[in-house]
Image: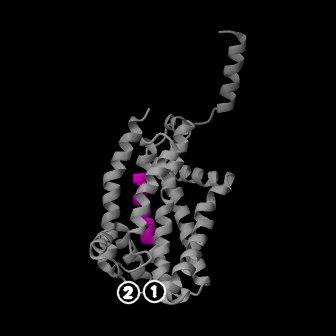
């Protein structure tokens, strides 16, 4: 051993200290740490908040004043129908950014670095999804604030609005597992965006977000009624109107559980085998 190497070892030993080795991070603490990392990325790149701040405002104002007069006679009369729908449509659309974030991390080698750490393996994915859930909450709050400023007064009150947002967050957290899987399987962020839009556009527009399915042709009406987004909008609308639809709410919870049960293990398998 050379004198230089010995000096280096002494410095490393001094830096590590002589105290007891820190305890390993628990699954909860490591998940929260990665969730905090997702929030720090927003702090350093605040432009990425456009999708949860400016887009919800633009969508709400645009659809209220473009369709309001034609569909309900005035924007104010259209708001009680549109507000729950635009809330669901906007937040569901935002979920696709989960896949893009993960795909970017893979491209930059961040995932390989993190996987080498002695932490609970799924905590990286769970933490990322927790950070995204906060983004969904932010978008939901902005939409509710804008619709209230425009004159919307939900009959379900604060309780109904909070319950509707909570149900929406549960569904979007579950849906994000699909995008997480896509983030692993597709090779570029552009490919991720293309596939996500191809799925989300028909899913959100062939629904009851903007108009009642009863005004549509019979075939289209049947398609719209079995759309999961339609069921989610029915549940959110009933809660915000103060008349909870138990069937729709249970259906949303069952769909959410099924998404996690199917895509959670699939995603973890791809994550574990990815090189």
Q: Which residue is mark 1?
A: 156
Element class at badge 1: loop
Do labels 1 and 2 touch, CB within 8 Å?
yes
Give the answer, above or below, for where 85 lies relative to 267.
below
Most foreground residue, 239 or 53: 53
Label 2 neighbourhood size at 10 Å, few (<14), some (14-19), many (20+)?
A: few
Report the magenta residues as a range: 166-179
Q: What residue do we see at 33% from left, 81% from top? A: 214
Q: Quadrant of the C terminus?
A: top left
Give the answer, above or below, for where 113 lies relative to 4.
below
The tag earlier along the polypeptide, 1 or 2, is 1
Q: What residue do we see at 63% from left, 51% from top? A: 41
Q: Which residue is mark 2?
A: 243
Give the answer, above or below, for where 268 lies relative to 229.
above
All told, the count of numbered labels is: 2
Element class at badge 2: loop
Give x and y (percent) for residue 119.
Answer: 48, 41
Q: Main secondary structure of the magenta part?
A: helix
Q: Is residue 31 visible?
A: no
Q: Quadrant of the N terminus?
A: top right
Q: Seen in the image, is 32 located left or right of residue 257?
A: right
The image quarter in which residue 54 lies: bottom right
Give x and y (percent) for residue 106.
Answer: 52, 39
Q: CA distance from mark 1 to mark 2?
A: 7 Å
């Amino acid at each position: 051993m050379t004198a230089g190497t010995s000096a280096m070892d002494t410095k490393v030993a001094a830096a590590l200290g002589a105290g007891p080795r820190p305890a390993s991070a628990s699954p909860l603490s490591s998940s929260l740490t990665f969730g905090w990392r997702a929030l720090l990325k927003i702090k350093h790149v605040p432009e990425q908040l456009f999708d949860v701040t400016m887009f919800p405002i633009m969508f709400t104002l645009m659809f209220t004043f473009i369709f309001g007069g034609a569909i309900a006679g005035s924007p104010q009369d259209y708001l009680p129908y549109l507000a729950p729908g635009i809330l669901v449509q906007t937040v569901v659309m935002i979920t696709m950014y989960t896949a893009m974030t993960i795909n970017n991390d893979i491209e930059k080698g961040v995932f390989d670095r993190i996987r080498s750490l002695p932490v609970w393996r799924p905590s990286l994915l769970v933490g990322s999804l927790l950070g995204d859930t906060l983004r969904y909450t932010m978008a939901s709050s902005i939409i509710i604030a804008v619709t209230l400023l425009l004159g919307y007064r939900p009959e379900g009150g604060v309780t109904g609005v909070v319950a509707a947002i909570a149900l929406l967050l549960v569904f979007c957290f579950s849906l994000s597992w699909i995008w997480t899987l896509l983030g692993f399987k597709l090779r570029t962020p552009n490919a991720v965006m293309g596939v996500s839009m191809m799925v989300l556009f028909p899913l959100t527009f062939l629904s009851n977000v903007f108009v009642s399915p009863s005004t549509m042709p019979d075939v289209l009406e049947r398609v719209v009624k079995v759309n999961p987004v339609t069921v989610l909008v029915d549940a959110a609308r009933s809660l915000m109107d103060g008349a909870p639809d138990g069937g729709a709410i249970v259906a949303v919870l069952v769909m959410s559980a099924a998404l996690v049960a199917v895509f959670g293990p699939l995603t973890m398998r791809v994550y574990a085998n990815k090189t």
